[in-house]
Image (cartoon, rainbow, N blue to C red):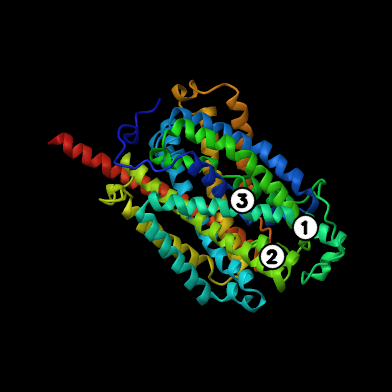
């Protein structure tokens, strides 16, 4: 096995705040994103079979690899530590870099969606909000500030935000899944739709189940559904050093949360397909759109829709807080291995959180949001942030799936042989997602420009990582030579 990481030799003063309940709710919160049922609904009646294929090719292999690697290396930093042990300093650093960029972009995309969600909460009078940059950036900036403050305060507070977000998400999905049955029941009683979109009268409320249309767009959606919609199981391992009994509790959280997650995606997307008009699905906020279509904008039904959309805001805040907290741990863990300056490892004297890493991350995230919003519409900005995160995440996943296949022999020898088959399937799925991510699934102002922004972002960020690693490595070698000379 590769040399021992300093993170495996000491606890670094971290507080173990997370139990099994916290981990299960965090898994649901992290994996089940509200926007992905809209992406999948774009496939129409083919969504169920596509979800099942994505689960077989990506989700189940991911869960198997995470359980096995966490059993051997239940350490703070998660995937970074596994890659560092398997591929050494350079491989570990690049894996951490891509995971870090993913998490910043994913958190930014979640925060960026909140103005759109709020417009559905308020109603038609707020339809202008997502496209008003000043108002949207003001809301987003306030949320980033809240994330920064709670991040510094630590998981003692943060875990409750995550738990509330996970419960809110499961509650909203339960309402979403039951919507077709509720509307069908009202029709049979002759009660009508009471303010809902009249076009729904012609919609079929049967559960959609068919083969997807064979096209490049369908393949692009399939790629996003794998490394995007179904990703995130491994993210909880970043907090292994802050979890109680991480070897068993993280494994159990995967087993408990997985069937819940799979059911939420398939049944929730089915509800969106039942109500939304093909070609007019809001990929930023599909659940609020569906609730408004089914329940209308007036009367008691509208109040129910507003309550559900409000719960979604709690989920968005919880998910943003969870991803933000995790991404701030990565520079800390990398710094413990001396691959980043020690500045990132400094903990708050009372709350034991990486305060410098938190401040740096919040600043970069806000900068990314502003840059993504320049010159394009809200839907396209959201897709740029989403695809930029998916491409980096796909690279990190390719590294994870490569560990049982080509990682250092002493580590591979501790893993079961069957894991290689699962890892090969997961690696191929991640590669497909990476290659197809430059294809836009929404109408964009300039498709070639859109693809160039996605590809350019990945190439540029990894070039920066390689240059930074080379410069720092040479500097560290020079310091060691000077120390040896003395």
Q: Which residue is mark 3?
A: 170
Determine the residue located farthest toward the left in the rendered image.
486
Would residue 294 appear left or right of 367 to someone viewing this image?
A: right
Q: Quadrant of the C terminus?
A: top left
SS assignment at label 2:
helix
Q: Residues within 10 Å of mark 3 (few under 14, many from 20)?
A: many
Verify CB contact (< 8 Å) between mark 1 and mark 2.
no
Alpha-carbon distance for marks 1 and 2? Answer: 17 Å
Q: Is residue 240 above or below residue 129?
A: above
Looking at the image, which residue is at 52% across and 62% down?
111
SS assignment at label 3:
helix
Q: Which residue is mark 1?
A: 182
Q: For this rendering, which residue is in front, 303 or 383?
A: 303
Q: Residues within 10 Å of mark 1 (few under 14, many from 20)?
A: few
Q: Give the percent coordinates (x, y) of residue 423.
A: 59, 31
Q: For this rendering, which residue is in front, 432 or 15?
A: 15
Q: Give the percent coordinates (x, y) of residue 406.
A: 52, 28
State which quadrant residue 242 falls in: top left
Looking at the image, which residue is at 46% across and 65% down?
143
Going from N to C along the chain, the mark reached first, 3 or 2, is 3
Going from N to C along the chain, the mark reached first, 1 or 2, is 1
In the image, which is nearer the foreground, mark 3 or mark 2?
Answer: 3
Q: Which residue is mark 2?
A: 289
In the image, which is nearer the foreground, mark 1 or mark 2?
Answer: 1
Q: Is residue 204 above or below residue 14?
A: below
Alpha-carbon distance for marks 3 and 1? Answer: 18 Å
Q: Can residue 42 be seen in the rendering of this structure?
A: no
Would residue 371 appear left or right of 282 to someone viewing this image?
A: left
Q: Is residue 47 above or below residue 253?
A: below
């Amino acid at each position: 096995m590769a040399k021992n990481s300093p993170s495996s030799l000491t606890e670094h003063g971290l507080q173990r705040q997370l139990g099994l309940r916290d981990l299960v709710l965090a898994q649901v919160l992290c994996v089940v994103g509200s926007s992905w049922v809209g992406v999948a609904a774009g496939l129409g009646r083919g969504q169920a079979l596509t979800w099942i294929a994505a689960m077989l090719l990506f989700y189940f292999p991911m869960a198997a690899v995470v359980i096995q690697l966490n059993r051997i290396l239940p350490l703070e930093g998660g995937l970074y530590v596994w890659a560092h042990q398997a591929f050494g300093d350079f491989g570990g650093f690049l894996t951490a870099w891509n995971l870090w960029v993913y998490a910043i972009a994913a958190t930014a995309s979640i925060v960026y969606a909140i103005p759109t969600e709020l417009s559905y909460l308020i109603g038609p009078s707020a339809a202008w909000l997502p496209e008003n940059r000043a108002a949207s950036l003001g809301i987003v900036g306030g949320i980033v500030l809240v994330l920064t403050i709670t991040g510094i305060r630590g998981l003692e507070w943060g875990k409750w935000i995550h738990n509330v977000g996970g419960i809110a998400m499961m509650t909203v999905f339960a309402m979403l899944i039951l919507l077709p049955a509720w509307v069908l029941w009202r029709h049979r009683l002759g009660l009508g739709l009471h303010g809902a979109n009249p076009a729904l009268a012609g919609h079929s409320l049967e559960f959609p189940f068919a083969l997807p249309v064979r096209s490049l767009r369908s393949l692009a959606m399939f790629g996003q559904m794998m490394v995007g919609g179904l990703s995130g199981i491994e993210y909880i391992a970043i907090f292994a050093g802050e979890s109680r009994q991480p070897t068993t509790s993280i494994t159990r959280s995967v087993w408990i949360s997985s069937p819940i997650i799979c059911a939420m995606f398939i049944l929730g997307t089915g509800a969106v397909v039942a109500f939304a008009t093909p070609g007019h699905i809001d990929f930023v906020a599909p659940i609020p759109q569906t609730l408004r279509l089914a329940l209308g904008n007036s009367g008691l039904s509208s109040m129910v829709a507003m309550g559900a959309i409000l719960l979604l805001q709690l989920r968005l805040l919880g998910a943003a807080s969870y991803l933000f907290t995790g991404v701030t741990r990565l520079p800390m863990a990398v710094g413990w291995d001396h691959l980043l300056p020690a500045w990132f490892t400094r903990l708050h004297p009372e709350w034991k959180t990486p305060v410098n890493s938190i401040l740096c991350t919040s600043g970069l995230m806000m900068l990314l949001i502003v840059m993504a919003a320049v010159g394009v519409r809200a839907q396209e900005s959201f897709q740029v942030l989403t695809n930029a995160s998916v491409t980096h995440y796909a690279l990190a996943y390719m590294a994870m799936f490569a560990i049982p296949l080509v990682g250092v022999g002493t580590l591979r020898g501790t893993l079961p042989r069957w894991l290689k088959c699962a890892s090969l399937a997961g690696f191929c799925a991640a590669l497909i997602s990476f290659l197809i991510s430059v294809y836009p699934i929404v109408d964009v102002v300039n498709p070639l420009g859109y693809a160039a922004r996605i590809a350019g972002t990945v190439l540029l960020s990894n070039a920066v990582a390689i240059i930074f690693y080379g410069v720092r490595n040479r500097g560290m070698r020079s310091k060691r030579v000077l120390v040896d000379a003395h």
